[in-house]
Image (cartoon, rainbow, N blue to C red):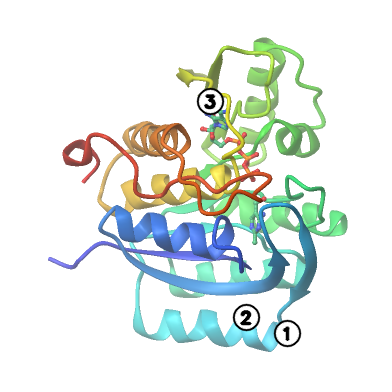
Amino acid sequence: MFYPSALSIAGSDCGGGAGIQADLKTFQELDIYGMSVITAVTAQNTQEVKEVFPLPLQTVEAQLQAIGEDFTPASTKTGMLYSAEIIQLVASAIKCYAWPQIVIDPVMISKSGAVLLQPSAMDTMLDILLPLACLITPNIPEAELISGIEIVDVPSLYEAGQRICSMGVPHVLLKGGHREDSVESTDYLITRDTYLALSSPRIHTRHTHGTGCTLSAAITSGLAKGNSIEKAVSLGKKFIMNAIAYPIEVDSRHLYGPVNHWAYADRGDMR
Ligand SMILES: Nc1ncnc2c1ncn2[C@@H]1O[C@H](COP(=O)(O)OP(=O)(O)OP(=O)(O)O)[C@@H](O)[C@H]1O
Ligand SMILES: Cc1ncc(CO)c(N)n1
């Protein structure tokens, strides 16, 4: 029996709240052996992404190959992929090494507005990466861009999720973190013919840097341990709820403070 392992293919956030850093902290906290393939280095803090440096394709390819030749991660998540060329390398590695349980967090734009996926790369992501995944976790603006449907209420949200399923992915977790009008923060797990609403109280907080990355890494951890998608998503929701609800103050200058990666109440249930 092997120890559960997971791989994150994503960008580096030197501020430690999002990207690869959030993913590895989450894997560690959930007792997963974490691995990383870095696609880009960002110079960012809680206030803004100052610069984005995509890594040379050869550097990304060499990391994918090194992992593929020696490990089979039980599950893999993708985050910031930046370009069509990087997406092509990632899709080839997933197929070549037959990595199972792929979760796509379709990171496009940071909270401060920086481009983390070139607009021209979206079609490549949808055409060649999406069909390899078991789950995609868009926020509302990302789901609107992918589906071409404006989300104004729950029926249009459901329709957008179903449209994305019809593009070749069996499950869509459409995250409601951007619906600021609501008293609940509800995410919807959508398949071609069902949907499940997962709600938690909406917390008024500045500490939302890295919420999406942390949620998808927690779900990927649940999958690595052999849980169903439904169970892994519900465990992930619990993890992010606690990470937002019990913030840590790392520095008073922070704009969007980081979430707390080691703050969930019921560790027994998560582990
Ligand atoms: N203020 C909040 N209170 C409670 N839950 C929240 C809040 N903001 C976000 N969440 C939850 O955090 C998770 C991530 O959602 P969100 O929509 O913020 O993702 P995201 O926009 O992809 O994040 P990121 O900006 O890190 O890419 C979801 O489960 C969402 O419901
Ligand atoms: C590297 C990276 N990935 C994802 C996010 C989330 O938006 C971010 N801010 N930075």
N-terminal label among 1 and 3 = 1
Image position of 132 with respect to 96: above or below = above
Residue drawn at x 42%, y 54% is: 101
Image position of 113 with respect to 179: above or below = below
- Looking at this view, name the residue that lies furthest to the front: 252
x then y, percent, for residue 156: 72, 16
Q: Are marks 1 and 2 in contact (CB under 8 Å)?
A: yes
| Distance (Cα) linking label 3 and label 2 | 32 Å
Q: Tell me which corner region of the image, top left, top right, bottom left or bottom right, holds residue 229.
A: top left
Label 1 CA crowd tier, 10 Å (few <14, some 14–19, many 20+): few
**Amino acid on which the number 2 mark rests in the picture:** Val
Q: Are marks 1 and 3 in contact (CB under 8 Å)?
A: no
Residue drawn at x 61%, y 83% is: 61
Disc 3 CB within 8 Å of nearest ligand 1 atom: yes
Q: Are marks 3 and 2 in contact (CB under 8 Å)?
A: no
Residue corresponding to mark 3: 187
**Amino acid on which the number 3 mark rests in the picture:** Asp
Residue corresponding to mark 2: 60
Residue corresponding to mark 1: 56
Q: Nearer the viewer, residue 150 or 116?
A: 116
| Distance (Cα) linking label 1 and label 3 | 36 Å
